[in-house]
Every structure is written in C-alpha cells, then in structure tokens.
Image: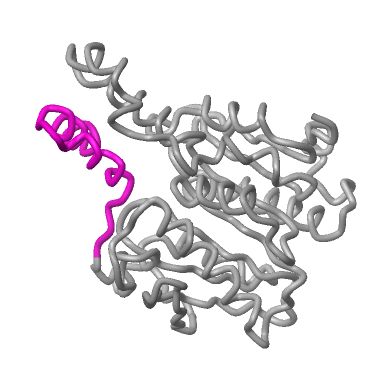
Amino acid sequence: MRILFWLMLCVLLPGLGGCANSLFYYPDRVDYEPRLLEPIPHEEVWMDTADGLRLNGWFLKAHGDALATIVYLHGNAQNLTSHAAYVNWLPAAGYNVLIVDYRGYGLSSGTPTRRGVLDDARTAWFYARQRPDVNPEKMILFGQSLGGANAIALAGREKLPGLKAVIADSAFSNYGRIAREKILQIPVLGYVLWPFSPLIVSGGLSPDAVVKKIAPVPLLLIDGDRDEVVPPTHSERLYAKAGAPVLLWTLHGAGHTEALGRFRAGSAPRLLKFMEYALSGDPAKLDPDDQGKLAVTH
C-alpha cells in the first residue's frame, strides 16, 4: 500500500512525476541485529565507491575451505541487518557471503538512486574479489527483489570476472512495468494515469534489456505463484528473454522472497545443488527435478 500512496502523491502533484523513480527504495538505519533469533557471526567491512561514498557490509566466512563466495544484494527496504537471516545458513554449507548495504541504507553514506545502487553492487563485487580469503575465480551473484533486478542488470551490462552463476529471487523485469502494475491498482485514477505511466517511472537500467547477455553464465530465476508484490509474470518474462543455460523455479504457495524464508527447507538443498552445478559445469549435480528443466538452448 505504501508504494500506491506515493505513486498517487507523485502523479497528483504537478512537477513531481520524476519522484516516482525513488519509490523503489525504503532504506532505514535501524539496527535489527538484536532482534535476530540467533546472532550471525560476521566481520563488519567497509568499501569505497567510485563517487566517493562509504558502503557498509557484513562478510560471513565459510566454515572450512570456501567452495565459492556469494555477493548478496538485498531487497528495497530496511537494511542488511534485517536481510542477513536469508543467507545466514550458507557459511555452514561452505560459502563465503558478502552482504552490502546500498548507499543510504544502514550505515552506508549517500542517498539511493537507480544508477547509484547498481554501482554499489559493482563496488561490492570488486571488493570481494580483492580479499585475500576469497578465490576471485569462484564467485556467485545472488539478489532478492530489488537486489535480484540489480544482480541481473549488473551481470548483463558487464562481464564480471570470476562470475559462475547469477541467482535472482522475486526480481521484477522492468522498472516501468512494475510501476504501471502498481498504478493500475489505484482505484479509478489508475486507469486514467496508466497511458502516462512511462512519464511517471522510466524503464532505464532494467534487467529485461540485458538479461540475455548473462549467458553463458548459468542463471536461476525464482518466484512464488502467490507473490502479490512482484507477480511471477516478471520472472517468466525474464526467463523468456534470457540466454541459456537458465532455470526457472515457481514455488507453489509462496509469496514474495519466501524461497529462503518460509520455504527454506525445500529450497536450500535445491539451491546448493544449483550452485554445485554452476561451479562444476556438470548438470548431473542439479536436483533431479531440475535436470529436466534446465534450458540449455534458448
């Protein structure tokens, strides 16, 4: 409902149409760590952006020798201390995890913008690669919601060195498309405003324009058929545009970013098998159900 309220404000007040592009960001500086059921062991890290900002992050070290390092891009609200619980299980499975707070989130300086947040994802990638405890040739990019859209946009716009897989959970396909869907939810007024939606929210830097360029790096798209925030049609659109190899999971009964929340018991082992496949190049490492679903030509 919050995005609907701000969309109405942006379109009803003259000259504020451009403000709708900022509605994708709901940062805060609250420390949610004390509310976690269990503490998450981590190293607090800092990284500098090309435009002079300081980003805060957590580095979760793998138990034993790391199989790979995952750069995790979180969703559009709160900050990393509220999202870390989605990935806190991965170090025990043998993976380093770097979680970054975008500009304006948590302890990171600056104000979030579409290009700025994308640049922050790139900053995190290259920070992770230069760490002495990271194998720079075995890295995975994983994002949820806004983070999933940015993971696809970054990997599609630039050939990231060391990238072995991209994972996008509940990602939207296009900024303008998701905004148009929200505009249509405004009673009565939405149908009047819908033809003008491209003027309200632009589609620049959207993942659907570049998703095909991720290939031949394996891409995993995850959605839930009950997702009312980002409908599964967005992942389906990305899947249709992607190059091979690509895999789409639609979790029955799942809502937004619930794959590693309410549905973790089934999704986590399956995700580990996907990463095994991506690191080895051997489709036999996939979950048996996924072996027949992997699109190797597209």
| Residue plotted at (29% across, 68% down) | 110
Q: Where residue 153 appears, x then y in whole percent?
A: 56, 47
- Residue projecting furthest to the left: 13
Q: Quadrant of the N terminus?
A: top left
Compare residues 110 and 131 and report the one nearer the observer: 110
| Residue plotted at (43% across, 33% down) | 230
Look at the picture and state if 272 lies above or below 10. Answer: below
| Residue plotted at (51% across, 27% down) | 225
Using residue 30 as the reference point, say whether residue 129 is left or right of it: right
Look at the picture and state if 116 lies above or below 30. Answer: above
Q: Where residue 148 appears, x then y in whole percent?
A: 52, 48
The magenta segment is 1-28
Compare residues 230 and 82 and report the one nearer the observer: 230
Residue 184's image quarter?
top left
Using residue 174 as the reference point, say whether residue 76 is left or right of it: left
Q: Where residue 40 appears, x then y in whole percent?
A: 46, 75
Q: Which colour assignment does the render follow?
A: one colour
Using residue 59 as the reference point, say whether residue 212 is left or right of it: right
Q: Where residue 298 appears, x then y in whole percent?
A: 79, 29
Is residue 22 inside the magenta stretch? yes
Is residue 63 inside the magenta stretch? no
